[in-house]
Amino acid sequence: MANAGKKPKGKIYYVDDFLSLAVNFFNTLGIDPYETVVKTNIWFQLYYVTNLINMVYSFVADAVYLANTLRDKENVLESCMVLSYLTFGAIGCSKICAVMYRRPKMTSLVKQLKSCFPSNALDQEEYDVKSCLKRTHMYTKAFGALYTVMYFAHTLTPIFVYFFEKVLLKNPDAKQTMPFYQLEPWEWRDTWWFYPTYFHQSLAGYTATCGSISSDLMIFAVVLQVIMHYDRLAKVLREFKVQALIKPNGADEDLKKLQSLIANHINILRLTDVMNEVFGVSLLLNFVASSLLVCLVGFQLTIKFSLEYFGKQVLLLVSVLFEVYLLCSFSQNLIDASENVGYAAYDMDWFDADKRFKKMLIFISMRAQQPVCLKATVFLDLSMSTVTIFLRVTYKFFCAIRTMY
């Protein structure tokens, strides 16, 4: 054993350390993404139902308001803004529904992650778990912070503008506006209803934003763990020392070790299959809606400049593009890591190995020739080339809208 005689260093890490940020965002919505030993109480479930009802109501009200604005052909900018908010809300709702529908599969995925995860300090040092966790936190925190800033920019700007005009500039014509849509079944302008109405729309925006963030953070954490397993497998294969010509029973020892590595490879492949089952539909809906969203925001930025809207829309555009880039980048890293296993099998010291060993090595090489990646169901395999496809389709949508306009 390569680790024999070494003393464990540092603390022990767990799968929950990778998933903690995603789970925390889910919990703020009243959602447990997978089953745990801790049972949720009735208040937690009631909070989730309240959030969901508020989100669905806001989505319907936003759609009605969009229908009203579309009748006014002079107000194209506001129609596009409302449609972009509606699209973003659809993304958040679809991801929440996908997570709840796939909860048993998510539970199975987490269990498999835990069964494959190195359990002691020596193994974690071999897997380089600390470095992988650090990388996971870097991406998840940066992505979560970007979406959080974007959310607060959209929800707080209208009320800050109103108080700035009303209090500081003493403008008697300062108008109260809602953050996402202006149509409600009750009169909220210049009444105390303005504040609860503003809160309920902000809460709906938070639900949509948090639903989108949480699902993506879960994908990032799972993919980076799978890449960690592939990297460790490739490393072990390259460092494999054949004992066939050194020890009397060396060939049998080599076979046992290789069988263990092949079993490990099969487990990782199964893990990626379950991962794509859980996140496939969510990824497909995400890419379709994101393409429309980028197109709408880009259209708004080109037809009219408004200082109040410019910063918010640029943040929304950057957030969506950054999300698409990260998903495709991680999928490309997954492709490279899975292919690297095949290269490692070829690079290892197999010349002096037993014939049975060489025949078994062919199987792991053949499996590695079919790289794995994130799959948006059967319709789309994600990679860096998908970014080009995404931008091309988005540009076609954009040109079509500009031509109609």
Image (cartoon, grey):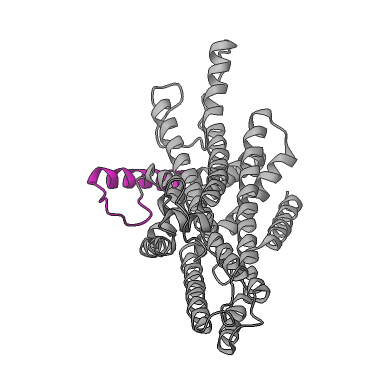
Q: Nearer the viewer, residue 33 or 12?
A: 12
Q: Nearer the viewer, residue 404 or 253?
A: 253
Pinpoint residue 136: horizontal percent, then vertical percent. Answer: 54, 49
Is residue 45 one of those drawn in magenta? yes
Measured along the vertical axis of the image, is residue 368 above or below residue 184? below
Report whether residue 94 is seen. no
Is residue 189 one of those drawn in magenta? no
Report whether residue 278 is seen. yes
Q: Is residue 61 left or right of residue 291?
A: left
Measured along the vertical axis of the image, is residue 263 above or below residue 156? below
Measured along the vertical axis of the image, is residue 206 above or below residue 230? above
Pinpoint residue 381: horizontal percent, then vertical percent. Answer: 62, 67
Total number of numbered labels? 0
Magenta stretch secondary structure, dominant: helix
Instruction: Give the residue drawn at x 39%, y 33%.
Output: 186
Q: Nearer the viewer, residue 375 or 55?
A: 375
Measured along the vertical axis of the image, is residue 185 above or below residue 320? above
Q: Is residue 160 left or right of residue 51?
A: right
Instruction: Give the residue drawn at x 74%, y 50%.
Output: 402
Pinpoint residue 293: horizontal percent, then vertical percent. Answer: 62, 50
Stretch in magenta: 32-61
Of all residues shown, which one is farthest toward the bottom?
355
Pinpoint residue 35: horizontal percent, then vertical percent. Answer: 32, 57
Q: Nearer the viewer, residue 335 or 299?
A: 335
State which quadrant residue 392 falls in.
bottom right
Of all residues shown, which one is farthest toward the left?
42
